[in-house]
Amino acid sequence: MHYLDTYNIDDLREAARQRLPKVCFDWLDGGTEDHLTWRRNREAFEEIRFSPRVMVDVGGRSQKVEVFGKTFASPFGIAPTGAAGLYGYRADIAQARAAKEAGIPFILSTASFDPLEAVAREAAGGTLWFQLYMSKNRETAGRLVQRALDAGCEALVVTGDVAMIGNREYNKRNRFSAPFRLTPHTMLDGLLHPRWLTGVFLKTLVDSGVPRYQNDDSPPNTQSIVKTPVASFQARRDEIDWADFGWLREQWPRKLFVKGVLRADDALLAKQRGADGIFVSNHGGRQLDGAPATIEALPAIRAAVGPEMKVMLDGGIRRGSDIAKALALGADMAFVGRATLYGLAAGGEPGVSHALGLLRTELDRVMALLGCRSVADINGDCLHQPR
Ligand SMILES: Cc1cc2nc3c(=O)[nH]c(=O)nc-3n(C[C@H](O)[C@H](O)[C@H](O)COP(=O)(O)O)c2cc1C
């Protein structure tokens, strides 16, 4: 299926499934253990109903949003996703450029295959935020923070929900070691997907050698995805606590977010410790299975932190209507992880733009049908049972 023949994000998911080796698709798409949270992220959105207003002049509607004094063209952005280079050629650069084109923020993962500096350079003029997997070692953490500052990242997003990597059993079933190990099984899988093999894997190999993590907190260019088990990439992340966050706050003078918050008291702690905002996130159902859907956790968190603090939400967003529901329940912006990765896998940078365009068009229609002229009009009153 060609990406231009897809009419929504679920279609794009199918196009991505056809393009990618099974080991890659499962890694992109999957959750953890019994996929309870992964499923719940979608179910919880599906259970929310709108309460549309009729006979409203929505002719001049706009989905522009202002955050920290900066205006974005839409109230959504691209969440950080590691190892995206497995799904597309120069994947992080492609995502950053598509986000720039769409006038929205892109968050680069610590675990990217494109170096932070290259992404900043290739998407100059866009809004680049950096997601930090923090190291307990202050020297290595400081080195990465300095790189993010030097590259001009406007915000740092510290992920707090990965004390350990979640239990992804399909990787074991697929005999796929994370991040990546060449085995007869993975080689055969790759050979059966020639467009991916030539257009992504071999192209990357010829271009820049074996793909590797480029922003790791160990010395640069030593983290080969072929040789390195994820355990060493994850070195001692289970000891990170709020004291480390306090240290980070002193190092980072720009906007600082905590990602992975699901409880109101954690959101308040983040606020007390000097965070400028939080991401209500369950890592797309890829960490603790049994955690709530983010859209379920959002209202209590918004109520606890008050209207001033920035609250972002990600997890399960596949439609413009999901973005509207997130805003109606108190999010300032929504972020998508898999939606643009499907686009990337199906069609590279134009595929990412296609995914963003679908969401933007859907949101525009939802706003019109709800009777909303601006993002500020999307509030609890738009819901069938106002909250
Ligand atoms: C393939 C993949 C890789 C991810 N890698 C990271 C990462 O490196 N850092 C991070 O904070 N979150 C990571 N996430 C989580 C996303 O930032 C985001 O929370 C999640 O994808 C949102 O859910 P959605 O995919 O349903 O939109 C990843 C998610 C996926 C699907």
Image (cartoon, rainbow, N blue to C red):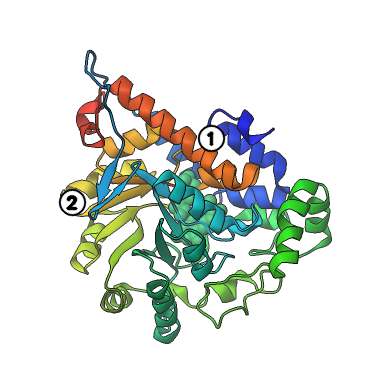
* Residue 206 appears left or right of 360: right
How far is disc 2 from disc 1 in space, using C-alphas? 33 Å
Q: Residue at x 42, y 64 (%)?
A: 131
- Check disc 1 and report its element: helix, strand or loop: helix
Residue 216 appears in the rendering: yes
**Quadrant location of the N terminus?**
top right
- Check disc 2 and report its element: helix, strand or loop: helix
x%, y% of residue 263?
A: 29, 54
Quadrant location of residue 180?
Answer: bottom right
Q: Against 18, is 145 above or below?
A: below
* Residue 297 appears left or right of 174: left
Residue 289 appears in the rendering: no
Mark 2 and mark 1 lie on one chain; the one further toward the N terminus is 1
x%, y% of residue 109?
A: 48, 62
x%, y% of residue 188?
A: 83, 53
Q: Which residue is mark 1?
A: 9
Q: Nearer the viewer, residue 7 or 241?
A: 7
Q: Amino acid at mark 2?
A: Ala
Q: Nearer the viewer, residue 39 or 105?
A: 105
**Quadrant location of the C terminus?**
top left
Q: Residue at x 63, y 29 (%)?
A: 5
Q: Which residue is mark 2?
A: 304
Q: Nearer the viewer, residue 315 or 362?
A: 362
Q: Amino acid at mark 1?
A: Ile
Number of numbered discs: 2
Which residue is farthest top?
55
* Residue 153 appears left or right of 52: right
Q: Residue at x 25, y 47 (%)?
A: 66
